[in-house]
Image (tube, rainbow, N blue to C red):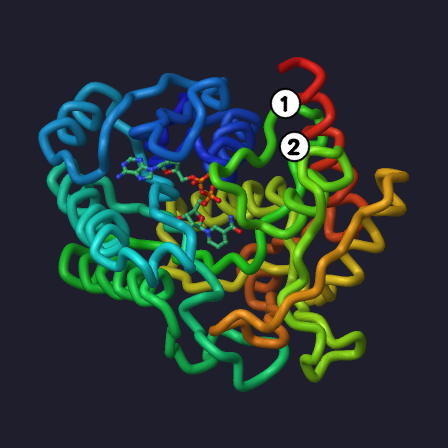
Amino acid sequence: MTHTVLVTGGAGFVGSHACKALHGAGFVPVTYDDLSGGCEKAVRWGPLERGDIRDAARLRDVLARHRPVAALHFAARIEAGESVRDPAAFHAVNVEGTRCLLEALQQADIASCVMSSTAAVYGAPQTAPIAEDHPLRPINPYGETKLAAETMLADFAARHGSRFAALRYFNAAGADPDGELGEQHEPETHLIPLVLQVAAGKRAQITVYGSDYDTPDGTCIRDYVHVSDLAEAHVLALRHLLAGRTSLRLNLGTGQGWSVRQVIETAQRVTGHRITVQESGRRAGDPPALVADATQAQRVLGWRPQRAALEMQIADAWRWMTRTAAVA
Ligand SMILES: NC(=O)c1ccc[n+]([C@@H]2O[C@H](COP(=O)([O-])OP(=O)(O)OC[C@H]3O[C@@H](n4cnc5c(N)ncnc54)[C@H](O)[C@@H]3O)[C@@H](O)[C@H]2O)c1
């Protein structure tokens, strides 16, 4: 029997890759997305239901018609810098929207929900790598709203006997290895696509914020995890919950950190294009290093990133960018 899964934010970067992985695993993904940040063309592995997660009536109608067995919840406002400028919008979607979704799921007797969380729930790291028991002290409204959503998920689960998985991604990167999907944020703020836009001649230079950090080359270090590996982790977490096993809070990263300079050098090698760099001062709230201890995800879900190598992540993103440019 084929099971349907509701995917909020399924038209976005990570959600669309998750829909492809769900389809490959025999599920039917029903994307629920208001297309405020996602792209209709990325919805290719199941139906699209256009709607806002804060619209309770629309959610009820979609759940009644499709009868999903579970939900994957990606829909959110995602840009940390923007959350400082407009915290109310982030609380409205990430907290109030999640509440609305959870109530609709509970009313429809859907007991399993996997939610996108983030390394931003930890705030400034006190250890490296960061494990799940690291203190939760977000330093911007984005991280605060994601932590509030995680807490609400746990409270709903305790009250209604449902199960959840909060998956805390580090830096999502790469693109579908088959070239069918990729990253299209507007405006783009993520390092790898920005660097590749310079390589492609769409942007004059890449600004490096801070080269005096206490790291081997002075630039910030981040843990980049391939979006297809993230998608696979969602399928594993979904199966775990559907099997009636315990709720989860898990880091998703490779456990390896790469500096901004290493990303730029690798992108030059992969693309064969020179990338012009402009150095600038540090940005407030940027920790020197954010690297995941993802051993729990390995132990509990058997998840092992297959495309962890930075070259591979950049090559997949480059193939997507050049192919999309060729088609556009
Ligand atoms: N990309 C990353 O590096 C990263 C890292 C950590 C966590 N996350 C989390 O992963 C999730 C997906 O991120 P992404 O990079 O794919 O973002 P994205 O912007 O590409 O996707 C988000 C999707 O949610 C939809 N959406 C937004 N508000 C909505 C609303 N009110 N109702 C219905 N749909 C709505 C957008 O249209 C979009 O399709 C987010 O929850 C984000 O916080 C992402």
Q: Is residue 306 above or below residue 30?
A: below
> Splitting the image into 4 quarters, where does residue 249 fall?
bottom left
Q: Is residue 306 visible?
A: no
Where does the C terminus fall, quadrant-wise?
A: top right
Tell me the amino acid under the disc marked 2.
Answer: Asp
Residue placed most toward the observer, 324 or 304: 324
Residue placed most toward the observer, 60 or 169: 169
Q: Secondary structure at mark 2?
A: loop
* In this picture, residue 107 sits left or right of residue 297: left
Residue identified by numbered label 1: 180
Residue 113 percent location from the top left of the image: 32, 47
Image label count: 2
Contact (Cβ within 8 Å) of mark 2 with mark 1: yes
Q: Residue at x 75, y 33 (%)?
A: 200
Q: What number is the disc on residue 294?
A: none
Residue identified by numbered label 2: 176
Residue placed most toward the observer, 264 or 302: 264
Q: Is residue 320 above or below residue 275?
A: above
Residue 294 percent location from the top left of the image: 60, 66
In three-dimensional space, the C-alpha distance between marks 2 and 1, rounded to whole angstroms, equals 6 Å
Q: Is residue 49 visible?
A: yes
Residue 172 percent location from the top left of the image: 58, 50
* In this picture, residue 299 sits left or right of residue 44: right
Judged from this view, the residue extending furthest toward the top is 327
Q: Residue at x 65, y 72 (%)?
A: 210
Q: Secondary structure at mark 1?
A: loop
Q: Residue at x 34, y 46 (%)?
A: 76
Q: Ligand 1 is in which quadrant of the figure? A: top left
* In this picture, residue 105 sits left or right of residue 255: left
Tell me the amino acid under the disc marked 1.
Answer: Glu
Q: What crowding class fits label 1: few (fewer than 14 Cα within 10 Å), some (14-19), or many (20 or more)?
A: some
Residue 309 percent location from the top left of the image: 78, 52
